[in-house]
Image (cartoon, rainbow, N blue to C red):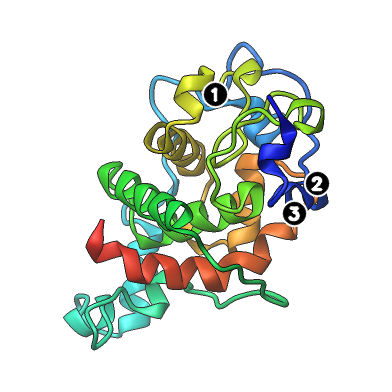
Amino acid sequence: MNTMLFSRWLPAIEKTSIVRKGALGVAGLAFVGGAVAGPAVAAQAAPEHVGSPVSQSVMADKDHKGDKGEKKSDKKDRKGKPSRDRLVPRGVQGEQSRIDLSAEQAGNVRAIVKATKKAGMDERAAVIAVGTSLQESKLENLGHLGDRNDHDSQGLFQQRPSSGWGSVEQITDPEYATTAFLKGLRQVDGWRDLPLTVAAQKVQVSAFPQAYAQWEDQAADLVAEAWNNS
């Protein structure tokens, strides 16, 4: 593929290129490296919270609200968008970065949000997914980059066919790629309560584990705008 077609974003990709480890293990459950390891193949994912009859996340919500249930005002702000507490429950970490989005990139945000909702996951999951994609591909559904490609990583999340994430056609499909990422995220214990960069790193296993943190603020804003329009 002619790498000149990708000249507008190659510097950003080169700056934050991801070093991947070995191929997917037979079991596929213990990640040797995020997008390297591929999605887990266990018949049933382990529960996110063990040892308590009530989900810790539910308890945390109740403690935070101070009542028996979640009020409508806690779910959405006055403009009908998801509340900031649901999008970024622990606030952002470190200096934040922003980029202007093209129509294609904005469409990929909506595709990620739509796939997240279809998977039955919440706004926080969408923020983690969008923030991860901002770091991995700047929300571009990248094809093969030739000599500058990070092995065979492609798509919104730079997933690798050789590591079990799926075929090229699959991982360059936004819905499939998002669903595969979320499958890995589900298996991260307590992912809702983790900073974005920690949750993303446990799935992706980047050589720059703190790099995802810089996109949390923009990811939250993008999900807030897209959540009720996807």
* Residue type, label 3: Ala
Residue at 26% from the left image edge and 78% from the top image edge: 76
User: Please, what secondary structure does the residue beneath circle 1 have?
Assistant: loop
Tag on residue 224? none
Where is mark 1, residue-wise?
165
Q: Can residue 195 be seen in this view?
A: yes
Q: In whole angstroms, how far apart are the C-alphas of marks 2 and 3? A: 5 Å
Q: How crowded is mark 1: few (under 14 residues within 10 Å), some or many (20 or more)?
A: many
Instruction: Tell me the CA gap for discs 1 and 3.
Output: 23 Å
Q: Name the residue under label 3.
A: 12
| N-terminal label among 2 and 1 | 2
Residue displayed at 41% across by 40% down: 47
Residue 151 against residue 7 in the figure, above or below: above
Task: Tell how many labels.
Answer: 3
Q: Tell me the amino acid under the disc marked 1.
A: Trp
Q: Nearer the viewer, mark 1 or mark 3?
A: 3
Please identify the quadrant where the N terminus is shown.
top right
**Which residue is pictured at 58% across the width and 15% down the height?**
27
Residue wearing tag 2: 14
In front of the other: 224 or 14: 14
* Residue 112 image point, x, y percent: 40, 48
Name the one closer to the observer, 73 or 224.
Answer: 224
Q: How crowded is mark 3: few (under 14 residues within 10 Å), some or many (20 or more)?
A: some
In which quarter of the view is residue 67 placed? bottom left
